[in-house]
Image: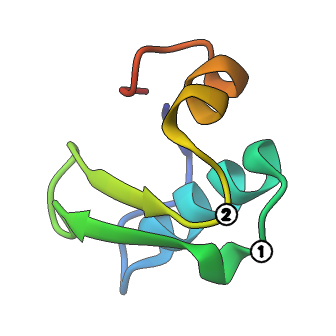
Amino acid sequence: MRVTVPPDAGRANAAVSVLIARAAGVPKTAVRVLRGETSRHKVLEVEGIDQAALDSLLGASGSV
């Protein structure tokens, strides 16, 4: 997944969280960065949806 928001003051992380939350149908507060806050590669936690359902929605096997 790519966003066009610059990684200034966490804005890119916030944009990714919003996109994932919308795709998963959960509030944006249910998505958080577990690892990679300052990296291009991130590990996210999404509450309120199981891994299989999230994979299906994103069309991936856990990585986007």
Q: Is residue 35 toward the left or the right of residue 30 in the image?
A: left
Q: Where is residue 28 in the image (x, y as percent from the top left)?
A: 69, 74
Q: Is residue 33 toward the left or the right of residue 57 in the image?
A: left
Check contact, mark 2 vs mark 1: CB within 8 A. yes
Residue 27 image label: 1
Residue 11 image label: none
Q: Where is residue 30 in the image (x, y as percent from the top left)?
A: 61, 75
Q: Mark 2 points at which residue?
A: 48
Under circle 2, the secondary element is loop
Instruction: Residue at 57%, 67% (x, y): give it.
Output: 47
Instruction: Residue at 36%, 66% (x, y): give it.
Output: 7
Q: Please state which amino acid type lies under the numbered disc 1.
A: Pro
Q: Give the label, 2 or 1, closer to the camera.
A: 2
First in residue order: circle 2 vs circle 1 = 1
Quarter-of-image position of residue 62: top left
| Image quadrant where one finds the C terminus | top left
Q: Is residue 38 toward the left or the right of residue 43 in the image?
A: left
Other residues around mark 2 within 10 Å, as few (<14) / some (14–19) / many (≥20): few
Other residues around mark 1 within 10 Å, as few (<14) / some (14–19) / many (≥20): some
Measure the C-alpha gap from mark 2 to mark 1. 9 Å
Q: Is residue 17 toward the left or the right of residue 10 in the image?
A: right
Q: Where is residue 48 in the image (x, y as percent from the top left)?
A: 67, 63
Q: In this view, does 53 lie above or below 49?
A: above
Q: Please state which amino acid type lies under the numbered disc 2.
A: Gly
Under circle 1, the secondary element is loop
Instruction: Residue at 69%, 51% (x, y): give it.
Output: 19
